[in-house]
Image: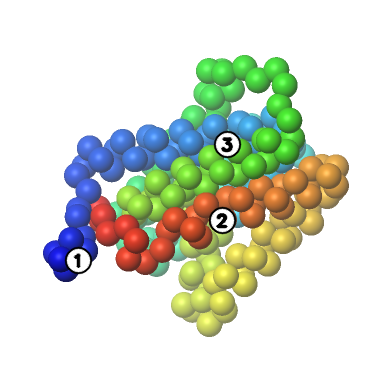
Amino acid sequence: MDPQDLSADPHRPYEDVMAMLVGTLFVALGVTFYTQALLLTGSTAGMAFLLQYATGWRFGVWFFLINLPFYYLAVKRMGWSFTLRTFVAIGLVSLFSELTGKWITIESLNPLYATLMGGSLIGIGMLVLFRHRTSLGGINILALYLQARYGLRAGYVQLGIDGLIMLAALLVLPADRVGLSVLGAVALNLIIALNHKPGRYMGVS
């Protein structure tokens, strides 16, 4: 293989915009499936689901508010470009998650299907965003900061926080929905783990 074929191919601005829209729409559709089936996931999205079920406030509102404190860490850890992209992505997910329920009507949704498809949709959406140097903020930024500052393993920090979110969910959701949520988290992370590997995708923004 020609080494030039492995060189990074910068994304054009319109490609970044299209990826931002497509990625956040995928995530918002997955969020709609989860909301309809009373499921949740980890990280700040999981916190937003949890607070939505506990208070009745919409997911989009909580998701936007919860992520606000993490932008400071994002600037320090990832820089302004990444942080601004992430801010826009979070805003779009918050907006689209509110609008998707108005754009489509779901009369019946099998919980297991919602688990696997919702988790896969969120994972695919996040994968699209990752490949354009964008994230959905939150706990992963905190985990990376704690690893750099205090030497704590980022993966263990993220796993511990997600575990606490799932345990807290038992206070507001039936145990079977929490169990399905764990399965959905596995599907989500498998999508990312199998498709987001160093050297597999060389495009940069």
Q: Amino acid at mark 2?
A: Leu
User: At numbered mark 1, what does the secondary structure look like: helix, strand or loop?
Assistant: loop
Residue 121 appears anywhere in the view? yes
The image quarter containing residue 13 is top left
Q: Which residue is mark 3?
A: 30
Write the residue at 51% across / 76% down.
Answer: 147
Write the residue at 78% across / 53% down.
Answer: 168
Residue 62 appears anywhere in the view? no
Marks 2 and 3, how far apart at CA: 15 Å
User: At numbered mark 2, what does the secondary structure look like: helix, strand or loop?
Assistant: helix
Name the foreground residue: 181 vs 191: 191
- Report the mark closest to the observer, 1 or 2: 1
Task: Give the mark, 2 or 3, whose residue is nearer the N terminus.
Answer: 3
Q: Which residue is mark 1?
A: 1
- Give the percent coordinates (x, y) of residue 47: 66, 49
Task: Give the mark, 3 or 1, whose residue is nearer the N terminus.
Answer: 1
Farthest residue, direction bottom: 151
Q: Which mark is residue 141?
A: none
Q: Amino acid at mark 3?
A: Gly
Name the foreground residue: 30 vs 59: 30
Marks 1 and 2, how far apart at CA: 29 Å
Q: Which residue is mark 2?
A: 190
- Give the percent coordinates (x, y) of residue 169: 78, 49
Marks 3 and 1, how far apart at CA: 38 Å
Mark 1, Cα crowd under 10 Å, few <14 / some 14-19 / many 20+, is few
